Image (spheres, rainbow, N blue to C red):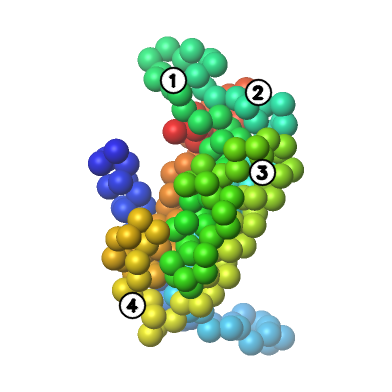
Amino acid sequence: MKKLQISLLLTAALSLAAASAYAQAAKSSPATGASASPSISPTIASAIDREISLVEKEVVDAAEAMPEDKFDFSPEKLNLPGGDYKGVRTFGEQLKHIAASNYLIWSPITGEKPPDTVNDGKGPDNMKAKAEIIKFVKDSFAFGHKSVATLNSSNLVEPVTSRSGRQTTRLFQATFAAAHARSGGCVSRKTVVAGVAVSPAFFL
């Protein structure tokens, strides 16, 4: 657990660094072409929002690629040599966990109460259909985009209280949610699972 927490913190830091670099690069890049429309000055909020969009695409693409009859699949069923996947979440449960966690992590940015369906980070127990789960995921990312849009230089590092009662900042919450979703929805180390290219790491 400690290693996972450290990994997530490092990912959050790297996401912020990438966001800052993107904002700086976009700000300093000259417009090309005489007919190019005036560019909007990038901000930390817009750069972080872009990072969220990248993670959102990874997760949603994986969800849409998986057939509905495989949403109850977990690597435990494969009995992989050397793999310890006993009791891990199914594909659908992991998607619900990502979505519910998005709400819980991003909500302190604005103070908006997350929906009751977050169910302590598990998502709705009775939600089984692929379309419903994907909508839950997309809605959670929409919540994140809305929350991050409120970030500015005056409130970025202002103290807020996380859902667990820990003192943190809006900046950390904004980047940590993306890092958590990426660690849970990682599909970069692909392997054929249930006939679809999804990493076993997705289910942990």
- N-term mark: 4 or 2: 4
Tell me the distance, in whole angstroms, between the alpha carbons under discs 4 and 2. Answer: 46 Å
Q: Is residue 5 above or below residue 155?
A: above
Q: Which mark is residue 86?
A: 1
Query: 139 or 32: which is nearer to us?
Result: 139
Query: Disc 4, disc 3: CB below 8 Å?
Result: no
Q: Which mark is residue 195?
A: 2
Tell me the distance, in whole angstroms, between the alpha carbons under discs 2 and 1. Answer: 20 Å
Which kind of residue does numbered mark 4 sit on?
A: Glu
Check disc 3 and report the residue beneath it: 133
Q: Image check: 30 left or right of 15?
A: right
Q: Where residue 61 sits: x, y (%)?
A: 65, 44
Query: 22 or 45: which is nearer to us?
Result: 45
- Can residue 199 be seen from the camera position used here? yes
Q: Is residue 183 above or below residue 106?
A: above
The image quadrant of residue 37 is bottom right
Check disc 4 and report the residue beneath it: 158
Q: Residue at x 42, y 12 (%)?
A: 81
Which kind of residue does numbered mark 3 sit on?
A: Ile
Q: Residue at x 37, y 62 (%)?
A: 162
